[in-house]
Amino acid sequence: MAEFNKLAQAFEYYFQCAPDVMTRAPGRVNLIGEHTDYNQGFVFPAAINFGTDVAVGRRDDRIISAVAMDYSGATSYFSMDDIRFDQAQPWSNYVRGVLKVLSETYDFNGVNMIITGNVPQGAGLSSSASLEIAVLKAVASLYKLPLSGVEAALIGQRAENEFVGCSCGIMDQLISALGKAGNALLLDCQSLAYEYHPINPDYQVVIVNSNVKRGLVDSEYNLRREQCEEAASLLGVESLRAATMDQLYAGRERMSDPVFRRARHVISENDRTLAMGRALEESDYRIVSQLMAESHRSMREDFEITIEPVDTLVAIIDEVIGTQGGVRMTGGGFGGCVVALVPKELVPSVENAVSVEYHARTGIRESLYICTAEQGAFSETSLDENC
């Protein structure tokens, strides 16, 4: 692929030899299943055609030399025997974290590494998980480590939780590792069982960033999580995954109204996510439209995580596609992106409507990405003479 040719040239520029392995890992978008992951529920992401590329070469010592092309060639240089958090270069902590966790299970030597990517930063498309999985895939391929996709995802999640300090779920890393071209992945966050469901090739995934910075997401995310845990406790279940709507309504009097509505979102969202799998299998986009609309309404009214510009984007796109496709907010909320499944012939109309109407109604300029569902992380061995 052309990106790998440029990556190999950059590696040779920095390290004066050809790379041994080049790897790509995609970002992702979640089609449905929001705030269900930490409730042990179901999510439905797809890997997208934006990702992180990593080229690596062997070293004879224990040193990691990592170059970030997208940060003006900034280099992080550290020993595998002394991996510490780097305040000065935050990007390097994703590299440091996954290698630290990987080294607890596998033995490998030092690595020369160059990194670049095109996952839009701050758009909620999981650039961090893409980086983590790309690094893990590259090093595992380089040293022939028997690392499975699920194991890589768990290592990436642990590195982000414990080393970087972000309490993410498993979805982002798993879809980056295990995505399948033309498909979305229905993931059970409790068992890590997963199955693929096809996206009709006559449809495209359209992602629109509202460009509203998600300023409240940390505190509000933690509050929503606490409210879900409170609801589960009051219902006598380990997590809301185990609760039914009948149980919820039977226990309503024991809950505050916000806690009840948070739980109602999670329980109903799990049902919608499972129904989405059936709808995609049958290519029934009228049902897809209904499920995504109900998901957005639930996030707006029960989970209370949408904001007016995001609701406006959903309304603009819905006016164009109607029941021929689906649209909803995606991600943590309080800003960020909407995702739409759009018939290819309507994509130009969606682009035009969003370009004209969104700024007119909100005064904000959006960023729009036309995406396809792509395969997960893969690597390519260099045929050139290496170091």
Image (cartoon, helix red, strand yellow):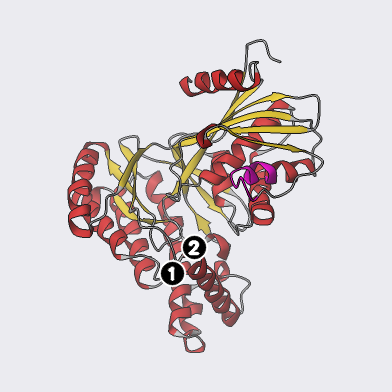
Which residue of the protein is positioned furthest toward the bottom in this rendering? 253
317 and 162: which is toward the camera: 162
Q: Give the percent coordinates (x, y) of residue 198.
A: 42, 40
> At x 43% / y 83%, what residue is drawn?
257
The image shows residue 12 at horizontal and vertical percentages of: 60, 18
Q: Secondary structure at mark 1?
A: helix
Q: Residues within 10 Å of mark 1 (few under 14, many from 20)?
A: many
Q: Earlier in the sequence, mark 2 or mark 1?
A: 2
- Asked if the residue under mark 1 is in contact with the one under mark 2, i.e. CB atoms within 8 Å, the reply is yes
Q: Quadrant of residue 129?
A: top right
Residue at 74% in and 48% down: 84
Residue under the point 45% across and 67% down:
216
Where residue 295 appears, as percent x and y from the top left, is 37, 62
Tell me if I can see residue 52 in this picture: no
- For the residue marked with disc 2, what is the amino acid? His
Q: Which mark is residue 265?
A: 1
Q: Nearer the viewer, residue 72 or 8?
A: 72
* The C terminus, quarter of image: top right
Q: Secondary structure at mark 2?
A: loop
Query: In the image shown, does 302 or 133 lie closer to the viewer?
Result: 133
Can you tell which mark lies on residue 35?
2
Residue 84, placed above or below residue 221: above
Q: Is residue 90 visible?
A: yes
Part of the protein shown in magenta: 87-97
Horizontal placement of 253 versus 194: left or right?
left
Of residues 121 and 348, the one nearer the viewer is: 121
Residue 326 in the image: state x and y as whole percent.
30, 51
Q: Callout 1, which amino acid?
A: His
Look at discs 2 and 1 and give the one toward the viewer: 2
181 versus 248 height, above or below: above
Residue 201 vs residue 190: left or right? left
